C-alpha cells in the first residue's frame, strides 16, 4: 500500500501531464524529446553497469556492510559515466539517423549525459533507501520527484517556452533535487566512503547485475525500438501518435511495478523450498488474474483514455492500444517469473531470454511496420513478450515449480484475443456494450483467485 500511494500518485500526475506535453510541443518536437529520453534510458544501464539492480538485492542482505554496498554503487556510476565520454561524437549522428527530418543540436547530446548521470545516481540513492527498509521515504521520494517534474515542465515549457531542452531538463532537475532531499533526510553521505570499495563484494554485485544490463537494454528494445522504426519507416507524426498511445498501457506497467517492488522484498526470505513454491503459486495466479482483468478494462476504456491524455489530433492512437496493452500484460507476467532468477541469483537466463525476444522484435518490426504501421509494431511486441514469458515460465521451473492454473490462463488468453480483435475490427454503435460484456466475462473467469487473496488479506488484518 505504501508503494501504491507513492508510485501511483506520482505516475498519475505524469499521465495527466501528457495532455500538456502534446499541446506544448509540436508532433516533431514531441517525437524528438521522447527519443532523447529513450536513448538516455538505454545508456543508463550500460553506464551504471546496472548497479541499481544489485543495490536492493545486496543491500537487504544483513551480512553485507551497507556502506560498502552504497560506496561501490556510487563509484560505479561515476566511473561508468567517465568511460562513456569518448563516445560523445557518436551519439548525435545516431539520433540524426533515426530522426532525419529534425535538426539534432549538440546541446541535445549534453542533455543526454546530464540525464544519464543524475538519473543513475538518483536510482542508486532511492534503491538504497528502499534496501534500508525506509519504504515510506522511498515512496515519498517518488511523489516529490514527479511533483517537481511537473513544476519544471510548466516553467520550462509554458512560462519560458524552451521546448525540447525544457522537456528533458525538467526530469534532470527533479532527479537532482530528489538526490539532494534523500541525502539530507537519510544522511546518505555518511554511507559513502571511497575507500570502502571491497573488490570481492563488488565482483559479486557486478556478476549479479551484468546479465540484467542486457536484460534492461532488451526490454528497452521491446518498448522503444517500435518508436524508432516507426519514425524511420512511417514518419515522425505517426511515431508521435504511437508514443502518446503508449502512455495508456503504462497504467498496467505502473500497477505491476508497484507489486513487483513490494514482491521483491517479500521473496528475499529464508523460507523452505515448499513454502516458496506455495507462496509463488498463490501469488502468481492471483497476480495473473489481476493483470488480465486490468488489461481487459483498459481496452474497454481505450477511447476515453486517449481523449483524456492527448489533444484531438492524437485520438486515432487508441487503435494501437488493444495490442499494446495485451503485450504489456505478458511483459508484466514475464517480470513476475523473472523474480525467481533474482531470488536464486541466477540472472543469466533473464538475459538470454530477453536478448532472444529483442532480436525477434527488431526483425518483426522491420517486416510488420512496413505493412501495418503502428499496429504492426504493437503486434511484433505482443508476439515477442508472449515468447519471453513462456520461455521464462518453463525454464524457471527447474529452480521453483510454480503451479500455474493452465486451464484458466488459456481461457483468459483466448478471451483477450477475441476482445482485442473485436475492438479493432468493429467500430459501430455497439462497441462499448460488446467491450463491457467481454470485460465482465474475463472478470468472472478470474474472480476466484482474487476473492481468495482478498479474504486472506482481510483475515490477517
Image (cartoon, rainbow, N blue to C red):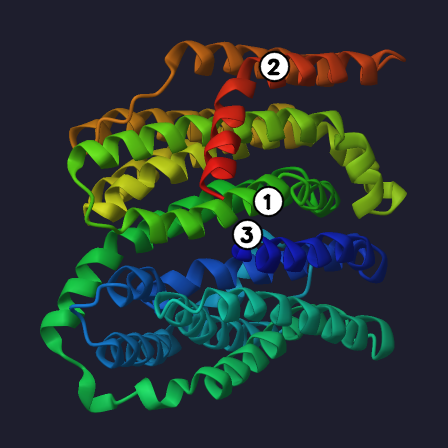
Disc 2: which residue: 444
Q: Is 295 drawn above or below residue 162 in the view shown?
A: above
The total of numbered circles placed on residues is: 3
Residue 279 coordinates in the image, percent (x, y): 31, 34
Identify which residue, 235 or 431, lies in the foreground: 431
Question: Which numbered disc flags the more N-terminal residue, 2 or 3?
Answer: 3
Q: In the picture, residue 53 is in which quadrant?
A: bottom left
In x, y percent, where is residue 438? 68, 13
Picture layout, residue 55 above or below residue 387: below
Cα–Cα span, label 1 and label 2: 36 Å
Q: Residue at x 80, y 77 (%)?
A: 155
Question: Which residue has dot 3 on it?
Answer: 1
Between disc 3 and disc 1, the foreground one is: 3
Q: Residues within 10 Å of mark 2 (few under 14, many from 20)?
A: few
Q: Could you say whether the residue bearing mark 3 is in a helix, strand or loop?
A: loop
Helix, strand or loop status at disc 2: helix
- Residue at point 64%, 27% (across, down): 375
Q: CA distance from mark 2 to mark 3?
A: 25 Å
Choose mark 1 or mark 2, whichever is in front. Answer: 2
Q: Earlier in the sequence, mark 1 or mark 2?
A: 1
Residue at label 1? Answer: 227
User: Is residue 280 toward the left or the right of residue 443 in the image?
Assistant: left
Q: Is residue 232 left or right of residue 13?
A: left
Mark found first going from the N terminus, 3 or 1: 3
Residue 4 visible in the snapshot: yes
Q: Quadrant of residue 26?
A: bottom right
- Mark carried by residue 60: none
Marks 3 and 1, how far apart at CA = 33 Å
Q: Position of residue 215 (x, y in %)?
A: 34, 48
Instruction: Give the camera-side residue of 84 and 411.
Output: 411
In the image, is 156 to the left or to the right of 294? right
Where residue 276 appears, as percent x and y from the top left, is 24, 36
Amino acid at each position: 500500500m505504501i508503494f501504491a500511494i507513492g508510485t501511483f500518485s506520482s505516475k498519475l500526475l505524469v499521465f495527466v501531464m501528457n495532455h500538456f506535453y502534446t499541446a506544448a510541443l509540436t508532433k516533431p518536437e514531441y517525437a524528438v524529446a521522447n527519443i532523447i529520453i529513450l536513448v538516455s534510458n538505454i545508456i543508463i544501464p550500460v553506464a551504471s553497469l546496472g548497479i541499481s539492480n544489485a543495490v536492493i538485492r545486496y543491500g537487504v542482505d544483513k551480512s553485507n556492510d551497507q556502506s560498502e554496498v552504497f560506496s561501490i554503487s556510487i563509484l560505479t556510476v561515476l566511473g561508468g559515466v567517465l568511460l562513456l565520454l569518448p563516445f560523445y561524437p557518436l551519439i548525435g549522428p545516431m539520433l540524426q539517423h533515426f530522426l532525419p527530418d529534425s535538426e539534432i543540436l549538440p546541446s541535445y547530446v549534453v542533455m543526454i549525459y546530464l540525464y544519464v548521470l543524475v538519473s543513475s545516481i538518483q536510482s542508486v540513492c532511492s534503491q538504497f533507501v528502499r534496501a534500508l527498509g525506509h519504504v515510506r521515504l522511498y515512496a515519498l521520494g517518488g511523489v516529490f520527484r514527479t511533483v517537481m517534474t511537473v513544476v519544471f515542465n510548466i516553467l520550462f515549457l509554458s512560462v519560458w517556452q524552451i521546448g525540447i531542452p525544457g522537456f528533458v531538463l525538467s526530469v534532470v532537475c527533479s532527479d537532482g533535487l530528489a538526490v539532494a532531499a534523500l541525502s539530507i533526510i537519510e544522511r546518505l553521505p555518511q554511507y559513502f566512503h571511497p575507500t570502502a570499495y571491497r573488490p570481492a563484494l563488488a565482483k559479486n554485485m557486478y556478476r549479479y547485475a551484468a546479465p540484467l544490463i542486457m536484460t534492461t537494454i532488451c526490454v528497452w528494445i521491446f518498448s522503444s525500438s517500435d518508436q524508432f522504426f516507426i519514425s524511420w519507416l512511417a514518419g515522425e507524426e505517426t511515431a508521435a501518435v504511437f508514443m502518446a498511445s503508449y502512455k495508456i498501457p503504462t497504467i498496467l506497467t505502473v500497477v505491476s511495478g508497484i507489486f513487483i517492488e513490494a514482491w521483491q522484498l517479500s521473496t528475499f526470505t529464508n523460507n523452505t523450498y515448499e513454502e516458496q513454491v506455495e507462496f509463488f503459486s498463490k501469488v502468481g495466479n492471483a497476480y495473473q488474474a489481476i493483470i488480465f482483468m486490468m488489461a481487459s478494462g483498459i481496452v474497454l476504456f481505450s477511447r476515453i483514455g486517449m481523449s483524456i491524455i492527448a489533444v484531438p489530433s492524437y485520438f486515432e492512437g487508441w487503435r494501437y492500444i488493444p495490442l499494446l496493452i495485451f503485450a504489456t500484460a505478458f511483459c508484466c507476467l514475464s517480470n513476475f517469473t523473472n523474480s525467481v532468477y533474482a531470488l536464486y541469483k541466477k540472472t543469466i537466463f533473464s538475459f538470454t531470454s530477453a536478448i532472444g525476444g529483442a532480436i525477434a522484435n527488431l526483425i518483426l518490426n522491420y517486416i510488420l511496420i512496413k505493412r501495418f504501421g503502428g499496429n504492426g509494431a504493437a503486434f511484433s511486441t505482443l508476439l515477442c513478450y508472449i515468447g519471453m514469458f513462456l520461455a521464462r515460465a518453463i525454464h524457471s521451473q527447474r529452480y521453483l515449480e510454480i503451479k500455474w492454473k493452465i486451464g484458466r490462463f488459456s481461457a483468459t488468453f483466448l478471451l483477450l484475443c477475441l476482445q482485442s480483435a473485436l475492438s479493432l475490427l468493429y467500430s459501430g454503435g455497439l462497441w462499448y456494450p460488446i467491450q463491457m460484456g467481454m470485460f465482465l466475462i474475463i472478470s468472472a473467469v478470474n474472480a476466484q483467485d482474487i476473492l481468495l487473496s482478498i479474504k486472506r488479506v482481510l483475515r490477517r488484518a
